[in-house]
Image: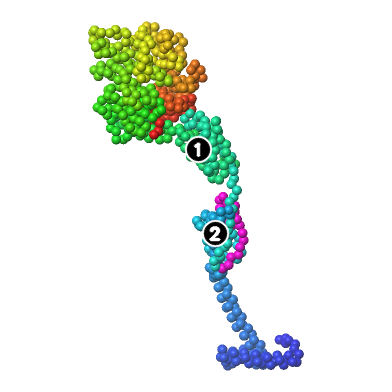
Amino acid sequence: MVQPIFDDDDEEKSSSSDQQDEQSASEEDDSNHHVDATHHSSDEAEMWKDGPAKKHDVELKLKFSKRRAFALVVAIIVLVGGLIGWKFDVYGKTTTWYNAASVTITILEKDSRKPVPAATVTIDTVIAKTNPTGTAELTKLKSGKVAVTITKEGYLPKSFDTRLYRGINPLPDAIIEKAPEKTFSLSGTIVDAVSQSPITKAKITVSEQDNTSDDTGAFNMQVKGDVSKIRVTKEGYDAYDGPLLLGEDQTFAPLKIELLPQLSFVFEQEKSGKVNLYTVSLSNATPTALLGDKDTAGNSTPAVSPDQKTVLFLSDRDSTTKLYLRDQKGNITKVSDDANPIFARFVDNNTIIYVYMSNANSPTQSALVSYRIDSKKRTVISNTPAADTKASVNIPLVTVSSDGQLIAYQMLPLQTSDTPTINLDDLRGIYTVKPDGKDIKKVLNPSVPYINKLYFADANKSLHYSFNDDTGYRIHSVDLATTQDKDITASPTILERTYVRDHGKPDLRDTTILTTSGKYIYIDTRNGKSDVFTSDKDGKNEVQITQLGTVQSIALSQSEKYVLVGSSLNNDTSLYVVGAAGGSVKKITPVYSLNAGFLSPP
């Protein structure tokens, strides 16, 4: 064994120190392990024979081995503990718990300094929303330097760094600024859903920004803010509320918005075996009883005043059928005690005319009556013969001029005995009279007893009538000023149509309306299909405005913008509405009969 080289002093010190170490080791060994030299093996005894140096070397080796074993045990314990801590994240959890922090922060709007609710606050991976007071609380954070981000739609994002400490960290109020609103261009056209005509001065509203349509119904506006919906309003139309959709290029396509006119209608409908009057509108197709659900009478044959506020109708509520009026407030008034009316219509808003059976025992004996609504004055305007003449009359045809200033009717005498006291031919003829019953004038005594149709024409200056004679179907015109009668069969006007009947002679149209603007609206049958047409007075610029093929009746709205169309084929009888100049034909409702009219809403 190689011994280290020491100087004399060092050797002495070393020797002395070794002796002390040996003594300590010996004592420790004796006290801790109670080692008895006699218990050593023969080999160990042999080692001890070499002297103190050999003994000292062995004891050092034993001492080192024990220390190594102890260190190994400690290392194993530390390693196992580390693995357990890694497996269950003991260190991480301990560190997180030790470094745990939370934050409270309030978000304010820059200009108003008001709290901003529903703002999103993000710190690391922790996210929270501000409450109605603008405050957000974030927990489970780690102390140390963090980045704070604040976002809200419509506001500019805000970010900043701060240092969090263990525990609760109340951060200073954060101020965020509203983002500059993006502006979009929005344009379009507002049209009538029925007539398809442009609507002027319609109000367009987007996010509290208003615009108005021009004379062509067009609008163009810049919008910002909430551009997800649009509202359009116009007096006389239902308001339109609809969505706005941005394209992929973040622009709006031009819009076409149709407003539904506020149109209501009165008509007959049969329910539970009884005919009654009902109303519907374009926006509500559910029929409503005009006279109320509790009205049990049979009510029929409605006629509407020119202002569309009053309805004239037949009712059996007084045991016999008579005429009644229903005003816009729902009040019902009996017109008169004249029973069994067979014709009734308004001349103007305050005057009605009707024909009733003046003799219940004679179904052909009738009289023409004028009635003033305001004064309740009843006037018989047909010159009915006195009772002692032993004659009576029948009124089969009545028509009213387009301006409501004149009434024309045909009167046929009836012989009530073999010896009438007057000349019946003197009674026969076509008469005109004013609505108040004055100025009765006989304008013609036709050569034929029966007239098929009767119309005012030429701006109410003449009367056209049609009849059959030995030569076929004829049309004549009577000048009201001179009473001159002229055959116009070969040169029909717009009031007539070519009707393949009786050698193809022309016939007066079934229904013709002259508007105040000078347009004719009429029903015509062509190739077996009946539809509605419109044209100028001279028949030019004709336009077919329906394609139904089964039209039987028409009525014009007060505004003259819409036409109520009655169509019937087999069991399908329905009402439609269309623009007076064309447009979109919209079905209103199935009906019992074509007795119907426009009705202004209350």
Q: Which mark is residue 106?
A: 2
User: Where does the N terminus fall, quadrant-wise?
Assistant: bottom right
In the rendered image, residue 435, in percent from the top left (x then y), is placed at 37, 19
Q: Which mark is residue 512?
A: none
What's under tag 2, amino acid-wise?
Thr
Horizontal side of 155 relative to 306 (left or right) equals right
Which of the 4 image quadrants contains residue 365? top left
In the rendered image, residue 310, in percent from the top left (x then y), is placed at 37, 29
Q: Which residues are magenta?
A: 149-166
Q: Is residue 213 visible?
A: yes
CA gap, disc 2 to disc 1? 40 Å
In the rendered image, residue 416, in percent from the top left (x then y), is placed at 25, 11
Of 563 and 68, nearer the camera is: 563
- Residue to which mark 1 is pinned: 232
Which of the 4 image quadrants contains residue 501? top left
User: Where does the C terminus fall, quadrant-wise?
Assistant: top left
Residue found 55% across the figure and 57% down from its top: 107
**Residue that sits furthest to the top in the current view:** 470
Horizontal side of 72 relative to 466 (left or right) equals right
How many discs mark residues in the rendered view?
A: 2
The answer to whether residue 165 is magenta is yes
Which of the 4 image quadrants contains residue 3? bottom right
Residue found 75% across the figure and 88% down from its top: 6
Horizontal side of 469 relative to 516 (left or right) equals left
Residue found 42% across the figure and 11% down from its top: 481
What's under tag 1, amino acid-wise?
Val
Q: Is residue 302 visible?
A: no
Horizontal side of 133 relative to 300 (left or right) equals right
Secondary structure under the numbered disc 2 in the rendered image? strand
